[in-house]
Image (cartoon, helix red, strand yellow):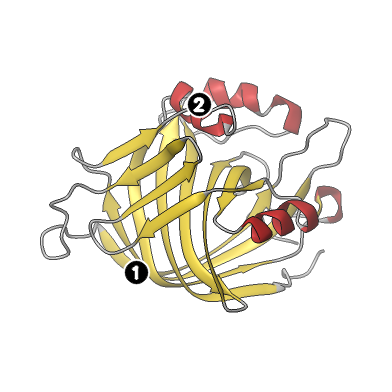
Amino acid sequence: MNARPRYNVEISPVRDITLRGTADLSFWQERLQGQDLAPAADEDGRAQLLLVAVDAKFMGMRFRESSIALFVRDPPDGVYLVHAFNSSRLFAFVERTFYHTPYYPAKILVETRLPASFEVSLAEGLILGAEMSPDSAADTRKPLRSQEESWEVPILLPRADSRQEGKLFFARLSGPADAYAFAARDTITLTPTPRAPIIEWLAESEFSPQEWAIRETATHARTKSVNRSSVQLSPAGQPG
């Protein structure tokens, strides 16, 4: 795959929330040892993570999903998909089986209208949630910036065994976005559970939310998953 990515799935319109934050770098360096990857550090020496929540339809079926991803050093601007959830058991199965992605079923709620929020729940209850403060109405909470965005990124996938070759796919996210600082009265909930170790990892690495990005009419696209060795990436993290 040396040409531009061929996106075989495109979904629009999509409502999505991205919560960007930082965490302890050494914790995530240890977690990635078996993946031949290293976390990228920000200017303060912290790892950078994305918590994403999506509400969309595919082939007439409504679904919601939530994913947790970590920026890595190589490829530059690449992210490692640590764990993901989908409200559809069928879609979660298809993701794991045909795309080799770490998706598992969960109950997910997404609200992109201010005050924005998302929740991920399993049978034992709420395990992951983020919510703007109740007084965050559209006429009182002003965005840091509002702009049209288009982001293409290689997404690297977990491998269960260090002898396996790692896989990746390319994703493109585009559409108008409003960015807001994570305010003092905004909240994040992390309730560790053995069924989703990622929640404990976020807590142990002292994940600190920094910024919301909210899109009401986004377009999401993705390629098939391929072996990392089949892709020659440019310094910008794109096929070259």
Residue 173, placed above or below residue 191? below
User: Tag 1's secondary structure?
Assistant: strand
Q: Name the residue furthest front.
A: 123
Residue 234 seen by the camera:
no
From the top left corner, tell me how far across and down residue 101 is, in percent. Answer: 70, 50
The label shown at residue 66 is none
**Side (left or right) of 153 relative to 35:** left
Q: Amino acid at mark 2?
A: Glu
Residue 1 seen by the camera:
yes
From the top left corner, tell me how far across and down residue 22 is, in percent. Answer: 42, 34
Q: Residues within 10 Å of mark 1 (few under 14, many from 20)?
A: few
User: Tag 2's secondary structure?
Assistant: helix
Instruction: Determine the residue positioned at 57% across, 49% down.
Output: 85
Residue 71, placed above or below residue 139? above
From the top left corner, tell me how far across and down residue 59 is, in percent. Answer: 62, 78
Q: Amino acid at mark 1?
A: Gln
What residue is disc 1 on?
147
Q: Are marks 1 and 2 in contact (CB under 8 Å)?
A: no
The quarter of the picture where residue 164 lies is top right
**Side (left or right) of 212 relative to 136:** right
| Mark 1 and mark 2: Cα distance apart in space | 34 Å
What residue is disc 2 on?
200
Q: Nearer the viewer, residue 188 or 221?
A: 188
Please tell me which of labels 1 and 2 falls first in the chain.
1
Q: In what quadrant of the picture does the N terminus appear?
A: bottom right
Q: Nearer the viewer, residue 151 or 141?
A: 141
